[in-house]
Image: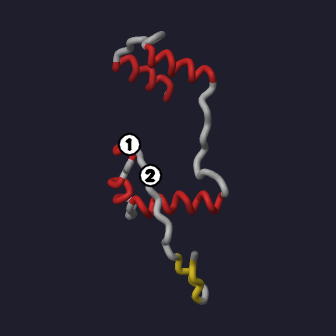
Amino acid sequence: MYIQQSYKRIFIKNAVLNARMESELKSEAIFKQLGMNTTQAITMFFEQIRLHRAIPFQIKLPNQETVQAMEDALAGKNMETISMEKLINQARSRVQ
């Protein structure tokens, strides 16, 4: 609901949203750095949905290879021990 005055629209906030989530997902510190609060961030999320008529980020299901790798990791199967030094060297070799 909104009231239109000349070229300005004044929105009346009349809906309450209650959501449960893991506490570490509630990123108030990040929002504060961005100059907003949680309510403003949620409002922006819903505004983007309204504007684009879609979720404002891509949602994808993992392919079968990724699903298998996740299941193996959870079960501790097909795991390899690697040193931090070797991991850093592999990353550096890919960058160069």
* Left or right of residue 28: residue 68: right
The amino acid type found where label 2 is placed reads Ala
| 78 is higher (above) or lower (below) than 70 | above
Identity of the residue drawn at 49% across and 71% down: 14
- Measured as percent of width and height from the top left, residue 47 is found at 57, 62
Please name the residue that numbered disc 2 is placed on.
19
Look at discs 2 and 1 and give the one toward the viewer: 2
Which dot marks residue 22? 1
| 69 is higher (above) or lower (below) than 40 | above
Name the residue furthest bottom. 6
Q: Quadrant of residue 36?
A: bottom left
Residue nearest the viewer, comparing 96 with 52: 52
Residue nearest the viewer, comparing 58 with 25: 25
Identity of the residue drawn at 38% across and 62% down: 37
Residue nearest the viewer, comparing 68 with 16: 16
Q: Are marks 2 and 1 in contact (CB under 8 Å)?
A: no
Label total for image: 2
Element carrying mark 1: loop
Name the image colouring: secondary structure
Residue nearest the viewer, comparing 81 with 62: 62
Identity of the residue drawn at 39% across and 23% down: 88
| 58 is higher (above) or lower (below) than 37 | above
Which dot marks residue 75? none
User: Which part of the image, by quadrant, shows the N terminus?
Assistant: bottom right
- Measured as percent of width and height from the top left, residue 96 is found at 49, 27
Identity of the residue drawn at 41% across and 48% down: 20
Q: CA distance from mark 2 to mark 1?
A: 10 Å
| 60 is higher (above) or lower (below) than 29 | above
Element carrying mark 2: loop
The amino acid type found where label 1 is placed reads Glu
- Measured as percent of width and height from the top left, residue 56 is found at 59, 52
- Measured as percent of width and height from the top left, residue 23 is found at 34, 45
